[in-house]
Image (cartoon, grey):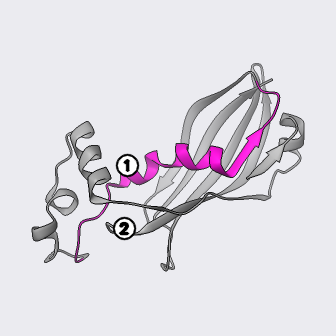
Amino acid sequence: MRRFANVEEFAAAKGEHLGYSPWRTVEQKQIDLFAEATDDHQWIHVDPERAKDGPFGTTIAHGYLTLSLVSAFMPEIFHIDGLTSVVNVGLNKVRFPAPVRVGSRIRGGAELVDIKNSPAGKLSTVRVKVEVEGERRAACVADTLSLYVS
């Protein structure tokens, strides 16, 4: 994990790759729980028998499940000391270039794309790419917006 002494030191890393989270395995139970939470029970996610004959040969994680893990990856990648709060402001752009098959190992990598002053603190754009171990294309690319308040 990369540590920054303060938000000014973080801002000086604009344009840099910040590092990677640890690998984690996406299991069917996690996919099923996400389906329950979101009422998205499409067979390609929750029916392993039917999915064997589907386009991916197995079940795949919901795109929004993959996206939701971005919020878990970011604090595993970097930390900024001296903040009173960090506020998730939203997303500018999200893409799902490749699926996450059940049993795949994924991790997030982050790049500080931009950081600007705002009345409440510093507003950052961090691009997080969710990689699938052994795959060429990312499963998710998301430009996240966060407000850092000192």
Quadrant location of the C terminus in the rendered image: top right
Which residue is at a point 46% across and 67% down the rendered structure image?
A: 105
What segment is highlighted magenta in the picture? 57-83
Classify mark 2: helix, strand or loop. loop
Instruction: Please say if 148 is above or below 101.
Output: above
Mark 1 = which residue? 64
Instruction: Give how far across and how far down residue 82 sits, in percent.
Output: 82, 28
State yes or no: residue 79 in magenta.
yes
Mark 2 = which residue? 99
Q: Quadrant of residue 110?
A: bottom right
How far apart are the two marked residues, 2 and 1, measured between alpha carbons?
Answer: 11 Å
Q: Is residue 70 left or right of residue 61?
A: right
Instruction: Give how far across and how far down residue 32 sits, in percent.
Output: 23, 50
Instruction: Please say if 145 is above or below 57.
Output: above
State yes or no: residue 49 in magenta.
no
Q: Quadrant of residue 101?
A: bottom left
Which residue is at a point 22% across and 77% down the rendered structure image?
A: 57
Instruction: Give how far across and how far down residue 37 sits, in percent.
Output: 26, 37
| Residue type pointed to by label 1 | Tyr
